[in-house]
Image (cartoon, helix red, strand yellow):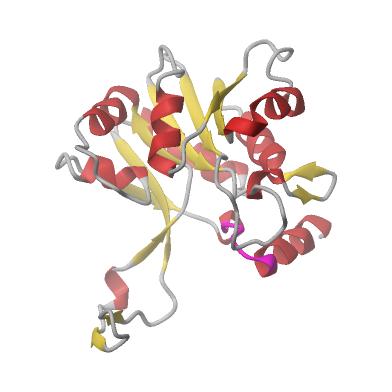
Amino acid sequence: MSDTVAIVTAAGSGERLGAGAPKAFVELGAQTILEHAVAGLLASGVIDRVVVAAPAERVAETVGMLGADTNGGLVTVVTGGAERDESVRHALAAVGDAGFILVHDAARPLTPLDQIRRVVAALRDGMRAVIPVLAVVDTIKAVDANGVVLGTPERAGLRAVQTPQGFEAALLQRAYQQSGGLCVTDDASMVENLGVPVHTVAGDALAFKITTALDLRLAQAVLNG
C-alpha cells in the first residue's frame, strides 16, 4: 500500500492570538500546539510520514522540538511561506512517493484520532478528495462591503470545514500545479477548481481551530478535562 503523508501547516504568525509567538509554537499544556498536532497524526495509526511547514526563522527549532532527525524519518521539516498555499507548495515538494496526502492545520491540535482515520478510510475506499465537516448551527448572512445584508443562505446546505483534508496525492499535486495563482483558504478549493468532486465525512467539535485567546483557553480547558 502506498504511503499516506500528512502535511502540517505551521508557518502562520498567529497575530490574532496575541501570544507574542507564531501560533503553532504557543504552549498548550506541557507541549506546543504543533507538537500536539503532529503527535495526534502519528498516533492515529494511519499516517506514515509527516511534513511540517515551519516559519523560516524557526526551522532548526522545529527540527529539534519534533525530533525530526532522530525519529526514523517519520517527520520532515521544511520552510513555510508567507501564505498558507505557499507553505503547502513547499511541503508538497518534500512529500516524495505517496498515494495519499492529508493537509492539516497545526492550529487544530485536539483533532480526535477517529476524525483522521475517517478521512483516510474514505480515501482508501476510492474517494479522491475528502474533507471533514460540521453542520452550521448559526444563521449565516451574506453582506456587501458596507455591511448591508444581501441575503440569507439556506442553512441546511451549509457546512463548516475542518482538517485534515485528504486527497489522492497526484490529484493534489496537479491542483496546485494548475492553480494559476488562485488564492484560497483551503486545499479542497484547489481541487474544486479542477471540477473534481470533493466528498465529506463527519467532523468533530473538538477539531476546532485555535485562532483567538479565547480558543486557547478553551483548548486548555479541554486538555485539563
Q: Main secondary structure of the magenta part?
A: loop
Provide residue 166's location: percent of width, then percent of height.
40, 37
Provide residue 116's location: percent of width, then percent of height.
53, 40
Which quadrant holds residue 96?
top left
Residue drawn at (60%, 34%), measured in percent from left and top?
A: 41
Which contiguous range is marked in magenta? Answer: 208-213
In-image side of 125 versus 66 (left or right): left
In this rendered view, identify the residue nearer to me: 54 or 40: 54
Quadrant in which the N terminus is drawn:
top left
In this rendered view, identify the residue nearer to me: 41 or 124: 41
Q: Is residue 142 above or below residue 42?
A: below
Magenta segment includes 67 = no
Q: Is residue 74 above or below residue 83?
A: above
Provide residue 167's location: percent of width, then percent of height.
35, 33
Let me know if residue 34 appears in the view. yes
Quadrant in which the C terminus is drawn:
bottom right
In this rendered view, identify the residue nearer to me: 157 or 62: 62
